[in-house]
């Protein structure tokens, strides 16, 4: 019985729950605290810079060249008047003295003294100006201008006369009121000469077929045959946008000289030299055109230069 009693009073032992250990990576760690401080500091610094930063940008400097329009009419007129007075004289004392007074109206005092003996009282020749060409008026510093000109003179000595042409350069000063004075004496110079430039010559590039070439050629021959005497109303059948003006001349069409054809942007571009006979002078006139043509129902000239 005793053993039985003991057996009955036994209580089952409670099983202890197994506790899982959780490792906290925590806000209490020093490294995490430092990272937070860095993050907050960076954010604060960014906000500060946003409000206090200087707006910097790259400045691309451009050199602006202003073109000054110079009215050279006064300079050219002044120069022509001077040239006429300077190169005109008779081999007579009165004429020579009158010339000396006239040229003083153009020259500085220094140049007046320099030119006293340019034409002597005993000079055997007379001179008259038959032509003046102003080749260039070039601005210099301090309101000075260089003028290059040519003068044609008829030089007479006794009963003999000859035509000469000379080229000179002078320097003028123009003050704030527009008055002019020559500050450098006529100096031998050279006028512009013929340039060696040759423009590129157009060539047919095979973009226009033979049938179209023939059509356009016939159209142009017909057009240029009546063009010299055509009215605005008549031109409207062949020309758009006033590409060619009426000329109202007695020209007789002769031929198209070696026309060149190209296709450009769905248009036919033509370089055409037109040979005319001027019925008034009987001289031959070659007119050169660069034309653009389009075809709707008929061929039309839409542009020219």
Image (spheres, grey):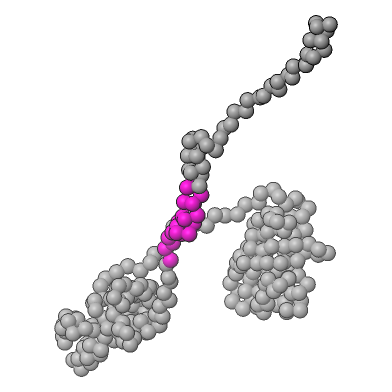
| Image position, residue 297 (x, y; %) | 83, 64
Q: Quadrant of residue 105?
A: bottom left
With 155 as the anchor, is 25 left or right in this view?
right
Which quarter of the rendered picture does the C terminus lie within? bottom right
Q: Residue furthest front?
A: 1
Residue at image coords 57%, 54%: 201
| Image position, residue 68 (x, y; %) | 41, 74
73 w.r.t. 7: above or below: below
Q: Quadrant of residue 277?
A: bottom right
With 253 as the anchor, is 281 left or right in this view?
left
Residue at image coords 48%, 36%: 30
Q: Nearer the viewer, residue 136 or 252?
A: 136
Is residue 119 shown to the viewer in this render?
A: no
Residue 93 highlighted magenta (yes or no): no
Q: Nearer the viewer, residue 62 or 99?
A: 62
Q: Residue furthest bottom?
A: 94
| Image position, residue 288 (x, y; %) | 61, 65
With 281 as the anchor, is 216 left or right in this view?
right
Residue at image coords 77%, 64%: 299
Which quarter of the rendered picture does the N terminus lie within? top right
| Span shown in magenta | 41-64
Is residue 107 shown to the viewer in this render?
A: yes
| Image position, residue 173 (x, y; %) | 28, 80
With 141 as the anchor, is 290 left or right in this view?
right
Q: Nearer the viewer, residue 265 or 195?
A: 265
Q: Nearer the viewer, residue 98 or 275?
A: 98
Total tally of numbered discs in the picture: 0
Residue at image coords 45%, 57%: 53
Residue 42 highlighted magenta (yes or no): yes
């Amino acid at each position: 019985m005793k053993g039985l009693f003991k057996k009955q009073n036994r209580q089952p032992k409670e099983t202890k729950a197994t506790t899982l250990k959780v490792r906290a990576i925590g806000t209490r760690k020093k490294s995490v605290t430092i990272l937070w401080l860095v993050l907050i500091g960076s954010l604060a610094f960014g906000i500060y810079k946003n409000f206090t930063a200087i707006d910097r940008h790259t400045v691309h400097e451009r050199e602006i060249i202003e073109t000054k329009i110079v009215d050279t009419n006064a300079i050219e007129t002044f120069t022509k008047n001077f040239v006429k007075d300077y190169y005109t004289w008779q081999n007579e004392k009165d004429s020579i003295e009158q010339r000396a007074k006239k040229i003083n109206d153009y020259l500085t005092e220094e140049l007046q003294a320099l030119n006293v003996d340019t034409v002597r009282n005993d000079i055997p020749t007379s001179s008259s100006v038959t032509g003046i060409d102003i080749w260039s008026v070039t601005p210099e510093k301090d309101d000075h201008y260089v003028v290059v000109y040519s003068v044609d003179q008829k030089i007479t000595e006794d009963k003999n006369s000859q035509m000469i042409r000379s080229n000179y350069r002078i320097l003028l000063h123009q003050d704030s009121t527009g008055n002019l004075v020559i500050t450098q004496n006529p100096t031998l110079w050279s006028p512009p000469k013929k340039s060696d430039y040759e423009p590129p010559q157009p060539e047919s590039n095979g973009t226009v077929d033979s049938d179209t070439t023939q059509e356009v050629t016939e159209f142009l021959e017909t057009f240029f045959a009546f063009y010299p005497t055509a009215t605005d109303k008549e031109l409207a059948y062949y020309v758009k946008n006033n590409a060619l003006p009426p000329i109202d001349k007695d020209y007789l069409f002769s031929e198209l000289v070696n026309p060149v054809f190209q296709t450009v942007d769905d248009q036919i571009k033509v370089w055409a030299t037109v040979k005319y006979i001027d019925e008034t002078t009987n001289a031959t006139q070659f007119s050169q055109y660069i034309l653009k043509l389009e075809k709707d129902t008929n061929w039309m000239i839409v542009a020219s230069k």
